[in-house]
Structure formats: C-alpha cells, structure tokens
Image (cartoon, rainbow, N blue to C red):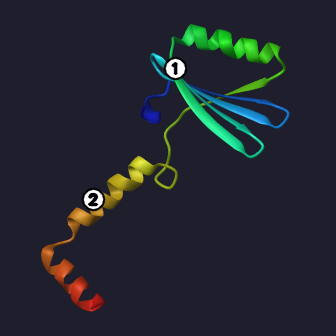
Amino acid sequence: MDITKAKKLIELSKDNRKILVTVYDNQVSSCVEMEAKKYCESCQCDEQTCGEWIEYLKAKGYSATEVELGELGLEESLPKFLEERQAKTSAVTPAEEVEKQETIE
C-alpha cells in the first residue's frame, strides 16, 4: 500500500509501547513497537471500525495523537528523491557517461 494514499495517521502510546495506525480508504495498517520488538499488520476495514478500535485502546489507557499529513520535502520523501535522481541520470548525455567511465578506470 502506498503511504501517500493514507487518509489518517494516529500514534497511540502507553508505557513502553507505541502503536502507529495508518488509515487508508478500505484498509488499516498498525505497527506496534514495544521495547526491542516491532511488528506490523494490516486488515480490511472501514474508518468507523478503526475509530472504534482506537477508542477501545484509549479506554485501556493509551494516549492518542493524530499526525497531520502533509507534503514532504525532497530530503524526507523517498519517492521525490528517486524522481530527482532519475531525472539527473537521464539528463546525462552518452558522451558525458563515457568520460566518467574513462576517469574511473
């Protein structure tokens, strides 16, 4: 699932445990981090069911923070980095490429 298609991102925490919940149109992914263990899982469900689950966790003592989703800059975004790198690579002419190879050898 493409993270850029996420509708909502919620971080839940309690004691030494963190849960990062990512909500998509019809799928929810959760990643749990506790001490040295980390694991993720995904399931098909709607936003309402996910909200009920988050409320359930809050009732169990978890604090919840919704992370505002926004546009990442070049340094933070892997897809943007790859696009820029591809653009630079395709902008190199064959003559420049041969010159680079001769210099390396």
Q: Is residue 40 above or below residue 64?
A: below
Q: Nearer the viewer, residue 87 or 30?
A: 30
The answer to which image quadrant residue 55 occupies is top right
On the image, the x and y values in percent for residue 5 come to 43, 29
Which of the image's four quarters has the N terminus? top left
Residue named by callout 1: 43
Which of the image's four quarters has the C terminus? bottom left
Q: What residue appears at the point 59 percent right and 9 percent down from the top-left corner?
A: 49
Q: Amino acid at mark 2?
A: Ala
Q: What residue appears at the point 59 percent right and 33 percent down from the top-left corner?
A: 40
Lateral position of residue 63 relative to residue 4, left or right: right
- Measure how far apart labels 1 and 2 are at the Cα level: 36 Å
On the image, the x and y values in percent for residue 42 come to 53, 25
Q: Amino acid at mark 1?
A: Cys
Between discs 1 and 2, the one toward the N terminus? 1
The reply to whether callout 1 and callout 2 are in contact (CB within 8 Å) is: no
Lateral position of residue 85 relative to residue 3, left or right: left
On the image, the x and y values in percent for residue 95 come to 14, 80
Residue named by callout 2: 87
Lateral position of residue 11 relative to residue 62, left or right: left
Helix, strand or loop at label 2? It is helix
Helix, strand or loop at label 1? It is strand
Q: Nearer the viewer, residue 24 or 38?
A: 38
Q: Nearer the viewer, residue 68 or 9?
A: 9
Q: Residues within 10 Å of mark 2 (few under 14, many from 20)?
A: few
Lateral position of residue 62 relative to residue 5, left or right: right
Which mark, by number, is residue 33? none
